[in-house]
Amino acid sequence: MSQTYGIEKPKDHVEWSGRAPVRYVVVIDSGGAAVSRLFLATRHQVDEYDGGVPEVAQMIQGIQPVKGASGPEWDAALQGHSMQERLDADVYTLAV
């Protein structure tokens, strides 16, 4: 019989940062209302908010947006939006 009294020794701690940080915030019209979509550097969407929430405003504060998300790198990420919505979108690139 072991001397641990049935209590297993804790495993070694492993550092892991979790998921990758958000790199892009795209504010785009969706059916007449602004929507903020958060993307990783791979252009994989990780979250979506109403366009006017304070958390998004705080994230993009002081960052100049690029007008339009019409490039081929956005085709798969924004496939549900019309080309006009994509042209009018504001793309914010966050510092990582």
Image (cartoon, rainbow, N blue to C red):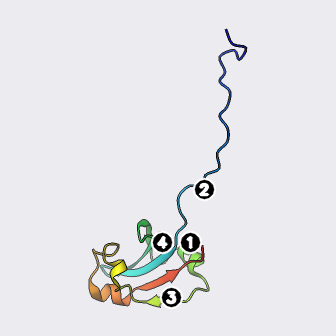
- Nearest the camera: 48 or 43? 43
**Residue under circle 2?**
17
Q: CA distance from mark 4 to mark 1?
A: 20 Å
List the single residue furthest toward the top. 1
The amino acid type of the residue labelled 2 equals: Ser
Within 10 Å of disc 4 (Cα), the crowding (few <14, some 14-19, many 20+) is some
Within 10 Å of disc 3 (Cα), the crowding (few <14, some 14-19, many 20+) is some
* Circle 2/circle 1 CB separation < 8 Å: no
- At 45% across and 77% down in the image, what residue appears? 51
Q: CA distance from mark 2 to mark 1?
A: 21 Å
- Nearest the camera: 36 or 22? 22
- Nearest the camera: 73 or 28? 73
Numbered disc total: 4
Quarter of the image holding residue 73? bottom left
Helix, strand or loop under label 2: loop
Q: Is residue 32 above or below residue 96?
A: below
Helix, strand or loop under label 4: loop
On the image, the x and y values in percent for residue 28 come to 39, 81
Which numbered circle lies on residue 41? Answer: 4
**Residue under circle 3?**
65
- Name the N-terminal-most of marks 2 and 3: 2
Q: CA distance from mark 3 to mark 4?
A: 16 Å
Q: Is residue 10 above or below residue 34?
A: above
**Residue under circle 1?**
55
On the image, the x and y values in percent for residue 96 come to 60, 73
